[in-house]
Amino acid sequence: MAIDIAGKKVFTLREVAQSIQRTLNERYKSTFWVKAELNKLNHYSHSGHCYPELLERIEGKVVAQFRSVLWKGDFDRINKAFNAVLKEPLKDGITILFEASIQYDPVYDLSLRIHDMDPSYSLGELERERLENIERLKKEGLFTRNKQLEFPDLPQRLAVISVETSKGYADFLKVIDQNPWGYKYFHFLFPALLQGEKAVDSIVAALKKIKHVQHHFDLVLIIRGGGGDIGLSCYNHYDLAREIALFPLPVLSGVGHATNETIAELVSFRHFITPTETATFLLQCFHDLSVPVENTFEKLRTAPGKAIRQKHEQFIAAVKYFSLSVRRTLDSQDQFTRQIPQRIQNTERQNRQLLRQQLDTSTERLKHSGGYFLIRQKTLLDSYEQQAKMLDPKLILKRGFSITMLNGKALTESMKANEGDVIETVLFKGKLISRVETKKK
Amino acid sequence: MTKKPNYKAALDELQTIIQDIESGNIPVDQLSEHVKRAAELIKTCRTILRTTEEDVARILEELESSEST
């Protein structure tokens, strides 16, 4: 009840608080769902209760914040659900969707009591963040940067980021240190936390250390195993992925069984599921280098012998060929010499025959062509005689022609004779003497 | 730090020698010389895979000096 002091109505603090409590209890009777960023979980392991710090940010600026309580019973149940759905415990920095009620206590002030959470909402948010980070790395040209490095010819000096006491590290060492081929690797441990919230900073710090002494190493390995598949979301963190992507040595990761490959794995030069698998890969690299050497070792035992045998065989073959070709040449020379007299005889006989044949042919030709010549000449003579006969004036006169003569000369034109001239007409048989009476042209 | 002999270079030389021997390119009087070289290279390669020369103390020293700067 308010009391009156110096004319003023005065309440005690408790009365004010109780009034607010009453009003709030009347106004907020039921629970409601809220979306917020779980900035700090503030889990007290002794009591098991949590006092989460809730935030809302817009473009990085805090626009609302609230204290809250999550009692042990609720926390255990919710945390179990998170581990099942997200493969992550409830932790700082994730976005949550929770069922709450307003709680006001005169001593402990105003807070939200968290009754329940929806882990699948947080999973979606994490996946969204993961994809955003991948996009960002791709846009910045970092996503494949480490993969573009040249793999060392001899991956022998290993900078290992791991936990010294972990099963994964022990498995890894067992495979590479006790290999039956005696391959020797130099490995140097850079201890770091490999899961949970502090892993990002811890691994980044280890990578920075390695960078200072990178000339002593060929590869960086991030080895984790035996920790189950809880707490791997740190490997989706942008800062870690960026550090790996930009690292000057190839980074091999063997960090475990995430359902979705984490970004750290995706940007690594290569990634493996288990430490053993990573170690086996390194052994295989050495095998690939060793096998050609061992093959040449085998060849070296047989190849020189073979080469010498081959040369020897070539020599024997050359000797055989030489003696054979010498013999063949001598034989053919000998045969040639023996055949010379016979050849001379043959040639002489052939020449003689040829001459005789030529002579015979000429004689025959001469005979033949002589006869032909005589016949031809006779025919010509006959034809000349015939022509001569045809031209004989007697034969012409015989046919009825006559020759008129004046003063002893043949008269061929009427104008050469004058009227009264005595002309002589010679016939085939006999002559006629006449006088010209008239003449005509 | 002493530089390790280059594995790939040794392997390449080794394979060239073996090929030459196998193809009969090497005169008989030079054969033993080449075989000797090949044996040396095999030994070198085997040794490279089975020894390391890194000095842990040296790395620690360098790490410490990088932290103090």
Image (spheres, coloured by chain):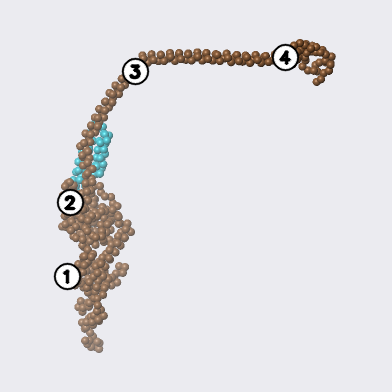
Q: Is residue A414 above or below residue A221?
A: above
The label number, if any, that marks residue A398 in the structure image: 4
Give the CA distance from mark 3 to mark 2: 84 Å
A340 left or right, relative to B51: right
Same chain for mark 3 and mark 1? The answer is yes
The crowd level at tag 4 (other Cα within 10 Å; few <14, some 14-19, many 20+) is few
The numbered mark, 1 or 4, whose residue comes first in the sequence reads 1
Nearest the eye: A439 or A76: A439
Q: Compare residues A406 and A119 and report the one nearer the observer.
A: A406
Instruction: Tell me how far mark 3 sits from mark 4, CA to CA.
Output: 90 Å
Have a look at marks 3 and 4 and say if they share a chain. yes
Disc marking residue A48? 1
Query: Which marked residue is nearer to the observer: mark 2 or mark 1?
Result: 2
Q: CA distance from mark 1 to mark 4?
A: 181 Å
Residue A212 visible in the picture: no
* Residue drawn at x 76%, y 14% as measured from the top left: A403
**In this view of the protein, which residue sits in the foreground, B60 or A79?**
A79
Q: Which residue matches tag 3? A: A336
Check the picture and name the quadrant holding the C terminus of chain B: bottom left
Which disc number belongs to residue A116?
none
Q: Earlier in the sequence, mark 2 or mark 4?
A: 2
> Disc 2 on helix, strand or loop?
helix
Same chain? Circles 2 and 4:
yes
* Crowd band around label 2 with a 10 angstrom C-alpha radius: few (<14), some (14–19), many (20+): some
| Pair 1/4: label in front | 4
Mark 1 crowdedness (10 Å alpha carbons): few <14, some 14-19, many ≥20: few
For marks 3 and 4, the one nearer the N-term is 3
Find chain B in the image and tell me its colour: cyan
| Residue where numbered disc 2 is placed | A175
Residue shown at the point (40%, 15%) measured from the top left: A347
The letter of the brown chain is A
Callout 4, which amino acid?
Answer: Lys
